[in-house]
Amino acid sequence: MMMVISSRHILFSSLILLAPLLVMAVEYQWPPLTYRHVYVKNNLDNHTILTLHCKDKDHDLGVQKLNYQEEFKFQFKPNFLGNRLYFCGLTWDGNLHWFVVYNDRRDLNFCKDLHWSINKDKPCLFNCDTQKYDCDYNYN
């Protein structure tokens, strides 16, 4: 006797096999399924206003004006293709700078919350493992 397997049976079997993986992914906060938070803080100096404009290819977060020690926050979920990229244009003292504030390839397995400190010479990113700012980044 020949057994016929319908596409419904295949789909149902696949869902049964994938369900435990999805539960584990959510429980252990697998990076592509968790929101990422990006904070950009003005650490230029006491009298310098930072004008900030962040976006990716699909989302324009608008123009923000930050006084000294103020910060702008946004959140998003990484995409499954691993190509999410946010960049920010920064203006102060009449000069435009920009840098990549989030890149899936660089940041997906880094800290869940990215805290950027904007300084005159370079942006610095807080490292949640060392509990210190890494200033190995540059403006373009």
Image: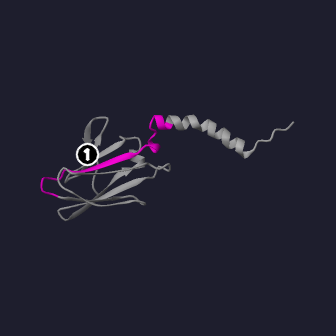
Q: Which residues are magenta?
A: 25-48
Which residue is rendered at x = 56% and y = 34% of the image? 20
Q: Does 3 sit above or below residue 89?
A: above
The verdict on residue 44 being magenta is yes
Pick the residue in front: 55 or 122: 55
Q: Is residue 68 found left or right of 108 in the rendered image? A: left
Pick the residue in front: 115 or 9: 9
* Element carrying mark 1: loop
Image quadrant where residue 93 sits: bottom left
Kind of residue at badge 1: Cys
The location of residue 139, given as percent across then percent down, is 27, 55
Which residue is rendered at x = 33% and y = 48% of the image? 38
Identify the residue under disc 1. Answer: 135
The location of residue 28, given as percent across then percent down, is 45, 34
The location of residue 132, given as percent across then percent down, is 25, 38
Quadrant containing the C terminus is bottom left
Quadrant containing the N terminus is top right
Residue sitting farthest toward the left: 47
